[in-house]
Amino acid sequence: MPLLLAIMASGRGSNAKAILEAIEQGKLDAKVQCVISNMPHAPVLTMADNFGVPTFCIFHQGLSRENHETQVLNVLKDYQIDYLVLAGYMRLMTPTFLSAFHAKNHYRIINIHPALLPAFPGAHGYEDAFQYGVKISGVTVHFVDEGIDTGPILMQESFPRLDDDTLETFKSRGLALEHVIYPKALQLLAQNRVRFIPHSKTGRVHVEVKAHAVC
Ligand code: GRF
């Protein structure tokens, strides 16, 4: 049985595309049940439509956060979904929305962030890391909790900032890495190799990846 996913995205959708391509290429044992955007005309909608995936736009403007989320949940309830995948979804979620997916120590919303968390959280990871002058940056796949990019980390990869990098070359090297690690991280979930372990001292949930499926 493939891992059943819903994707939420606000814009371009290059990560959503990488996920759909990985599925087509047999590298990711998953099925994308639907794609939801909060932005009308987001390129991700046309892209997903071309893959034959049902798409929905729920424009947030003029709606309270709660009302918007209720409408999103209303779409999602028609699909069986194991994980909700955020791929450039530029909105924070309320604890009520998160609780529709999370159980104690089991997170079911996942995100990709364009920096090596916990460094440079927020909406401008590449810009912030580049402007800071880091020599090494990276990308992070993490589960979503109530904070801003603070949830348990599933996978990270680093990349160097080269001396002749511009922000554009720096970003495009990072984005290429995102497209590799997001499908890889999801495949760990598809293989049931991910476990959430509360750290004995801090209580913070860590993610353990098993060599074999977790029974
Ligand atoms: C990516 O850089 C991702 O890390 C961040 O938003 C961007 C989305 O890009 N969260 P795309 O829409 O997947 O092309």
Image: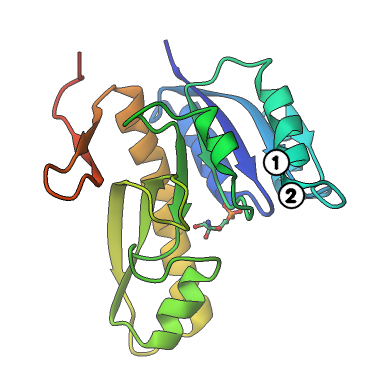
Q: Residue 125, how many percent across, how many down?
A: 47, 69
Q: Amino acid at mark 2?
A: Pro
Residue 75 in the figure: left or right of residue 162: right
Q: Amino acid at mark 1?
A: Met
How many residues crowd around disc 1 within 10 Å: few (fewer than 14), some, or many (20 or more)? some
Instruction: Count the labels in the image.
Output: 2
- Residue, disc 1: 47
Q: Residue 127, how many percent across, how many down?
A: 50, 78
User: Is 140 drawn above or below residue 5 in the view shown?
Assistant: below
Ligand 1 location (quadrant): bottom right
Q: Residue 94, how many percent across, how many down?
A: 59, 44
Residue 17 in the figure: left or right of residue 72: left
Residue 139's label in the rendered image is none
Return the residue found at the far right.
Answer: 62
**Displayed quadrant of residue 36:** top right
- CB at disc 2 and ligand 1 closer than 8 Å: yes
